[in-house]
Image (cartoon, coloured by chain):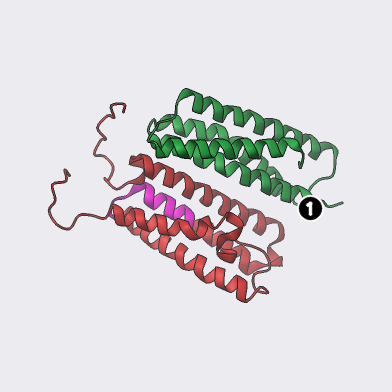
Chain colours: A red, B green
Amino acid sequence: MAEQPTPTQTRPRDAAIGSGLGRVLLLVYGIFALSASARALVQITTHFSEAPLAYLLSAFAGLVYIAATVGLAIGGTRGRGIALVSCSIELLGVLIVGTLSIADAVAFPDDTVWSHYGSGYGYVPLVLPFIGLWWLWRNRPAKESTAQAG
Amino acid sequence: MNGPLSLATIVVALVLGVWYLVRCALDKRPTNTDLWAMLGLGVLVVVLVVVAIAGLLTGDRPSDTTTFVGYLITTVAFAPVGVYLARLEPTRWGTLILGVAALTLPVLVLRLQQIAEVTSG
């Protein structure tokens, strides 16, 4: 509708921060980066000894979300690399931890974002890595020479 | 924390959230009314949070006060941040930003209720 100013070429074409839908994606990733890290921080600083494994996992999940957010935001070869690795870890994490938290409740007495496939977070943690990977796939570098302006 | 005010906030947030999703699907960018509606929801949330803080000072404290206060800060910041970001993105995706913010708020309010229920006694 409104005339958009031509985006400057200072940032890579696939940087999520440079497009509207990408910004929404970053918002959601940012919310999860914040909630997972904040939760881990509270857990570790107040009652770490109760469930060290779960709390370290929380912290790790938080870092992965932060990495994914940054990677998706900056784009380019390096950003894509960071995002691809962190989204894959996220996907594996939510699947593995989700399964373990159901199979071995003793090792996971306190919840992390990934416990029970993220049911405590409306299963968004289960969906989010797919969306992140979809974003990377959608914005994959063109192999063939297409009519796309560089 | 569990009164009609929470319920009103949740209902208003859900209704607004669905409205924004529909508007996004129709490829509409946020209108001034949309932005003001979000700020109105923000005011409702501020009232809710002030009541909760008053409860913290006078009544039973939740046993996990740190988390509770953290959630209060996040909750009160959500609507203004949503409006700010939506203004930066005057496209359909700005409307989706409002939608995401509006639909996250009920979750935050429910979490606040859960945390408030566990009191140290």
Residue at image coords 49%, 36%: B20
Q: From the image, which quarter does the C terminus of chain A lie in?
A: top left
Badge 1: few (under 14), some or many (20 or more) residues near its Cα, within 10 Å? some
Amino acid tagged 1: Val
Subunit of mark 1? B
Above or below residue A55? Residue A5 is: above
Residue at image coords 38%, 52%: A71
Q: Position of residue B18 (x, y in %)?
A: 52, 40
Residue at image coords 52%, 51%: A32
Residue A101 lies in quadrant: bottom right
Above or below residue A14? Residue A123 is: below
Closer to the camera in the image, A87 or A55? A87
Which residue was labeled with disc 1? B118
Q: Position of residue A95 (x, y in %)?
A: 50, 68
Residue found at the far right of this picture:
B121
Residue at image coords 71%, 39%: B6
Q: Position of residue A86 (x, y in %)?
A: 42, 60
On screen, residue B79 versus residue A19, left or right, reads right
Q: Is residue A74 located in the magenta-colored stretch of the structure?
A: yes
Q: Main secondary structure of the magenta part?
A: helix
On screen, residue B39 versus residue B50, left or right, reads left
Q: From the image, which quarter does the N terminus of chain A lie in?
A: top left
Above or below residue A118? Residue A14 is: above
Closer to the camera in the image, B120 or B8? B8
On screen, residue A18 versus residue A48, left or right, reads left
Q: Which element is circle 1 on?
A: loop
Q: Is residue A36 located in the magenta-colored stretch of the structure?
A: no
What are the residue bounds of the magenta stretch? A65-77
